[in-house]
Amino acid sequence: MKLFDNMKEFFFPSDEPEQKSDHKSQDIPSVPSIEEQLAGHESGNIVNIQATAQLQVVLVKPEVFTDAKAIADHLISRKTVVLNLETASPENRRRIIDFLVGVSYAISGSLKPVANLTYIITPYNVGFIGDDLAAELENNGVII
């Protein structure tokens, strides 16, 4: 009969775990569920991510090319930058724009003109919706 019992157990295993009398049962601690783990923490440790996310816009008015590094730091920290180049010399304007176009490309952002000598530079996580003001400015004779 033992042979048939062994064959039956081989082909149709029981749902109960087999315990052998010669081994001592070890107490294995159970792992608490995620709900049990969170219930044990104080509510002050849980932070709502959506409540802490902020969109920051920085207005800058650089005069020299060395100011472009600070603007790049704002972009790298995912802040939108409104760039006003009215007080910069034409040579510095070109250098600043060239540098910031490279920075915005590197962070998958975009640089768009919004008015004469004013640009908006957005990081990858900020969308920009609006008319193409560059085309409108060029139609009015403004060279960007």
Image: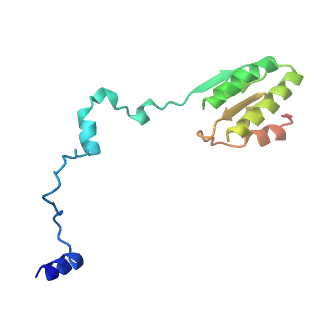
Task: Looking at the picture, tell me which residue is in the foreground, 108 or 42.
Answer: 42
Residue sticking out furthest to the right = 91
Q: Residue at 15% x, 57% y: name it.
A: 22
Q: Quadrant of the rendered structure where residue 130 is?
A: top right
Q: Residue at 16% x, 81% y: name it.
A: 3
Task: Looking at the picture, tell me which residue is in the foreground, 124 or 60.
Answer: 124
Task: Looking at the picture, tell me which residue is in the foreground, 76 or 55.
Answer: 76
Is residue 111 something that shows in the picture? no
Query: x, y percentage for residue 134?
Result: 77, 39
Q: Quadrant of the rendered structure where residue 65 is?
A: top right
Left or right: residue 49 compared with residue 123: left
Is residue 75 something that shows in the picture? yes
Left or right: residue 28 compared with residue 85: left
Give the number of marks. 0
Left or right: residue 113 compared with residue 24: right
Q: Quadrant of the rendered structure where residue 40 is?
A: top left
Query: x, y percentage for residue 128?
Result: 63, 40
In the figure, 57 relative to 102: above or below? Answer: above
Query: x, y percentage for residue 70?
Result: 70, 21
Q: Residue at 69% x, 32% y: name it.
A: 120
Query: x, y percentage for residue 28?
Result: 22, 47
Which colour scheme appears in the figure? rainbow
Residue sticking out furthest to the left = 1
In the figure, 74 relative to 104: above or below? Answer: above
Q: Residue at 71% x, 36% y: name it.
A: 104
The image quadrant where one finds the C terminus is: top right
The image quadrant where one finds the N terminus is: bottom left
Task: Looking at the picture, tell me which residue is in the foreground, 71 or 59.
Answer: 71
Left or right: residue 134 compared with residue 52: right
